[in-house]
Image (tube, helix red, strand yellow):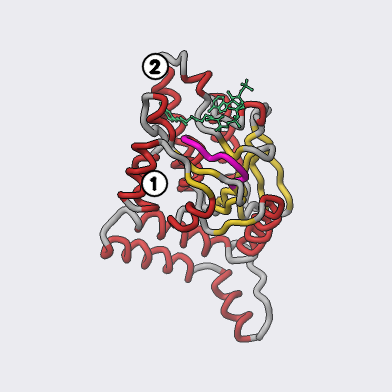
């Protein structure tokens, strides 16, 4: 598939997806969602990729939400297709056996905040702004915002953001536990790459199992979650990387993980 709304680069084991519609502040239209979905499918099949960075083109926006010019004329049927694709894409982020780092370089509004919430880690530029302004358009969040935001920041903070549509700045997002770190804008991509490189050096099957245990466990009671973890750690124990990691420790050298 030729991409017209996203840019995909692969540098060693790190893939970077950039939504590339800066004149629309990288707003998500159906074509963009299809391209992201296609890209994530391709990444899933590429065993050389160990970490993904997701960001937006330009200095102003990560993603300023769903594309209002596309939504305004959407029929009910088109809306259902858009909803289906959107939720598929965000679930695909969560099920991808590779971590995704959102590098939020500006406005992350509506679908932008929702997409970031489906990533494993969120790094923000000090210029970033988060918000779910859907209520100001007479709608409500449709890509999981009413579900993922309260789980992340708590009910009271999520309700206030969703009922008022107000934005929060990067420092507030950090205080809310919505982002891992805040950096000066010029340093954001360097920091994202440094974090991705650190993750890419770890045992990929271990990372895969840790992600599955975390994402599976967060939705269920503790006993069920602990069973997920027990299965995941059992799988990690069956890998060559487990032998390599422990042997390297005992031999006082750096491990060389192969993803086997
Ligand atoms: N869609 C389309 N165009 C957008 C856009 C958007 N979301 N955001 C910005 N743009 C366009 C602007 O119209 C403007 O276009 P021109 O006038 O140059 O042609 C250009 O990008 C630059 O924007 P501004 O001139 O407005 O830039 P400012 O710096 O003055 O303001 C801003 C930046 C981010 C504060 C402002 O652009 C803004 O408020 N943008 C809209 C934010 C927003 O309301 N986003 C949509 C949230 S609703 C669903 C699933 C999901 C959703 C809905 C349904 N279903 C399952 C059915 C999700 C909905 C949302 O995300």
Mark 2 and ligand 1: say if the CB distance to the nearest ligand atom is below 8 Å: no
Q: Which residue is mark 1?
A: 149
- Dot placed on the residue nearer the N-terminal end, 1 or 2: 2
Identified at 50% across, 48% down, the residue is 119
Q: Position of residue 75 (x, y in %)?
A: 41, 14
238 lies left or right of 189:
left
Q: What's drawn in magenta, residue-wise?
A: 104-110
Identified at 57% across, 35% down, the residue is 36
Q: Which residue is mark 2?
A: 77
- Residue 25 to residue 243: above or below: above
Residue 44 image-quadrant placement: top right
> Which class describes the residues within 10 Å of circle 1: few (<14), some (14-19), or many (20+)?
many
Q: Is residue 108 magenta?
A: yes
Q: Secondary structure at mark 2?
A: helix
Q: Nearer the viewer, mark 1 or mark 2?
A: 1
- Residue 228 to residue 167: above or below: below
- Residue 19 to residue 229: above or below: above
């Amino acid at each position: 598939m030729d991409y017209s709304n996203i840019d995909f680069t692969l540098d060693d084991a790190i893939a970077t997806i950039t939504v590339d519609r800066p004149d629309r502040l990288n707003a998500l239209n159906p074509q963009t969602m299809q391209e992201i979905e296609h890209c994530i499918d391709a990444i899933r099949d590429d065993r050389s990729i160990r970490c993904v960075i997701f960001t937006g083109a330009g200095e102003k926006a990560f993603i300023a939400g769903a594309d209002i010019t596309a939504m305004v004329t959407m029929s009910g049927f088109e809306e259902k297709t858009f909803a289906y694709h959107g939720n598929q894409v965000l679930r695909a982020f969560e099920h991808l056996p590779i971590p995704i780092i959102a590098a939020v370089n500006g406005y992350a509004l509506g679908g932008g905040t929702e997409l970031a919430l489906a990533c494993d880690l969120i790094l923000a530029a000090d210029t970033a702004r988060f918000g779910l302004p859907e209520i100001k358009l007479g709608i409500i969040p449709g890509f999981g915002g009413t579900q993922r935001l309260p789980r992340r920041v708590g009910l009271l903070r999520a309700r206030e953001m969703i009922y008022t549509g107000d934005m929060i700045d990067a420092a507030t997002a950090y205080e809310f536990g919505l982002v891992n770190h805040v950096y000066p804008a010029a340093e954001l991509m360097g920091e994202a790459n440094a974090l991705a490189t650190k993750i890419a050096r770890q045992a990929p099957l271990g990372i895969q199992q840790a992600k599955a245990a975390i994402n599976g466990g967060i939705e269920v009671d503790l006993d069920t979650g602990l069973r997920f973890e027990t299965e995941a750690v059992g799988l990690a124990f069956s890998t060559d990387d487990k032998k390599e990691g422990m042997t390297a420790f005992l031999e006082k050298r750096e491990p060389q993980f192969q993803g086997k």
